[in-house]
Amino acid sequence: MPLTTAHLDEAARQLQQGRSQPPLPIGNLPAHLQPQQIDDAMAIQDALHRRLSESGHGHLVGTKIGCTTPVMQEFLGMPHPCAGGIFDSTVRSQDGSFDFDSFLHVGVECEIAVQLGSALCASDAPHTRASVARAVSAFFAAIEIVDDRYVDFSRRIPDSRTWVADDFFGAGVVLGEAVHVWQKLDLADLEGVMRINGTEVGRGFGRDIIHGHPLEALVWLANETARRGRELPSGWIVMLGSVVQTKWVAPGDTVDVEITGLGNARARFQTPR
């Protein structure tokens, strides 16, 4: 049976604990609140977004797409992409500073991101690589900040549908400098490398993203959003997926990503003095 409005709000209230200050582990959702289908998970996610905005967490400005590369699908045991929200309060530009103690178990990912210059509307679906490319105004080298807010995600506790309801580990982003003239770049051949405190921890390519091209992740998102009767508006930020497996960080760490043709982004994890 579909979850009722009361059930959605109850589930969202528990998930919200993971982004309180100080954050609290989410734990397992009671059986009657657990999403049985992805659409249930997305309905809980909508309720969570409302609660987070109402409590001062900010406003939605974008979407992160998770599990778009083989390395991340294998790492998380999820064979298909999924989506979560990005809040303006969690977005940094080029050199971002984060309070390490505001997370439960914080990690980083090396990503390619885009910003839309025009909306991708439900009425225009099905979207294609060519149609979404026309809507992209800028590309970025980017870092996604993720937070393991769960009981034991390595044993799939809670399961992946609850992860989707909770924005699939999403906790923030750092966007490098916008690259507006990107049309001549070989997006599939872009190479990303991530370093922590100057030591390389992984690298990957744009072609590692689904169907061999970064924009195929945006095609998936645009069509999935259209299926739900919604659009991706102009100005929307989209994180297309990590080309490097998630790496966990320690207090004081500095994380750098560099993507050929797109530039750099940096994240610093500080503790209060």
Image (tube, grey):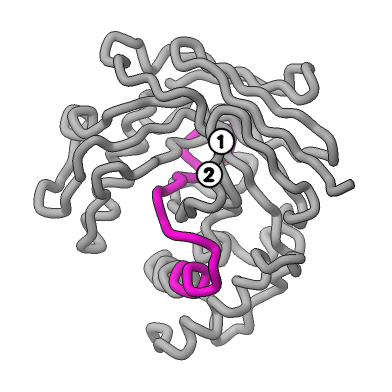
Contact (Cβ within 8 Å) of mark 2 with mark 1: yes
Q: Position of residue 271 (x, y in %)?
A: 84, 46
* Secondary element type, mark 1: strand
Q: Which residues are magenta?
A: 49-72
* Label located before the other in sequence (2 or 1): 2
| Magenta stretch encompasses residue 234 | no
Q: Position of residue 47 (x, y in %)?
A: 44, 74
| Magenta stretch encompasses residue 61 | yes
Q: Label 2 vs label 1: CA separation?
A: 6 Å
Say what amino acid the circle numbered 1 marks: Val
Mark 2, Cα crowd under 10 Å, few <14 / some 14-19 / many 20+, is some
Q: Residue at x 32, y 46 (%)?
A: 221
Q: Is residue 260 left or right of residue 194?
A: left
- Which residue matches tag 1? 174
Q: Please tell me whether residue 87 is drawn above or below residue 16 in the rendered image.
A: above
Q: Residue at x 58, y 79 (%)?
A: 13
Which corner quadrant holds the N terminus?
bottom left
Residue 150 visible in the current orientation: yes
Mark 1, Cα crowd under 10 Å, few <14 / some 14-19 / many 20+, is many
Q: Please tell me whether residue 159 is drawn above or below residue 114 in the rendered image.
A: below
Q: Residue at x 54, y 73 (%)?
A: 55
- Which residue matches tag 2? 91
* Secondary element type, mark 2: strand
